[in-house]
Image (tube, rainbow, N blue to C red):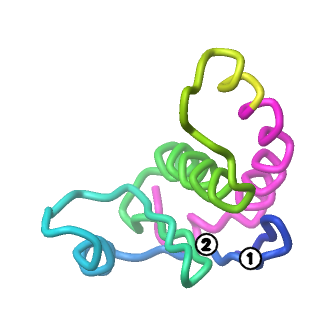
Amino acid sequence: MKFVMNDRIFTIKFVNQNEMFEEGHKINDYKFFYFGKTIYDKQEIWLDNKLSKEQTIKTLIHELMHCYIRMYSVSLENYDEENVCDLVSNSYGHIDNIVTSFINDMVWEKNNIC
């Protein structure tokens, strides 16, 4: 599925842990289990293809927040409760629309996600 964030077209993809590890290994030498990953230079959000439907949606929301913060250059320095509330309220509608489209596409059924 494709979506637009600040005039940039991103793609949501399902990948396996080996692919996520390889991409993550470019940044550091640690081996992590990734539920998802935002790849800014490829304009992609990767989701683990073995997650439950519920975890997939939570992970997508998490990755979309990374995407929103980076694409709209939101400063994360000196954040307090008011800043967090502003960030959530400003991003909510946009992220909710993307997640709703994702759910309506029933992408998990096409990828054998429970």
Q: Nearer the viewer, residue 72 or 39?
A: 72
Horizontal and vertical percent for residue 44? 58, 76
Q: Residue furthest top?
A: 81
Q: Please identify the quarter of the rendering in which residue 82 is found.
A: top right
Q: Is residue 6 above or below residue 76?
A: below
Q: Left or right of 31: which side holds 47?
A: right
**Cα distance between the residues tagged 2 and 1:** 6 Å
Q: Nearer the viewer, residue 37 or 15?
A: 37
Q: Picture coordinates of residue 42 (x, y %)?
A: 56, 84
Residue at 62% in and 78% down: 43
Q: Main secondary structure of the magenta part?
A: helix
Of residue 73 and residue 57, the one placed in the foreground of this image is 73
Q: Around disc 2, counting alpha carbons within 10 Å, would you say few (fewer than 14), some (14 to 19), or many (20 or more)?
A: some
Q: Secondary structure at mark 2?
A: strand
The vertical placement of 112 against 98, above or below, is below
The one nearer the camera, 68 or 64, is: 68
Picture quarter with the N terminus: bottom right
Q: Which residue is mark 2?
A: 12
Give percent across and percent down for residue 15.
Answer: 41, 76
Q: Which residue is mark 1?
A: 2
Q: Quadrant of residue 37?
A: bottom left
> CB under 8 Å between callouts 2 and 1?
yes
Amino acid carrying label 1: it is Lys
Q: State which region is magenta.
A: 87-114
Image mark for residue 38: none
Sequence-first disc among 2 and 1: 1
Type of amino acid at the residue the image marks with label 2: Ile
Decide: is 83 above or below 9.
above
Check disc 1 and report its element: helix, strand or loop: strand
> 49 above or below 26?
above
Residue ID at (13%, 69%): 29
Residue 70 sits inside the magenta stretch: no
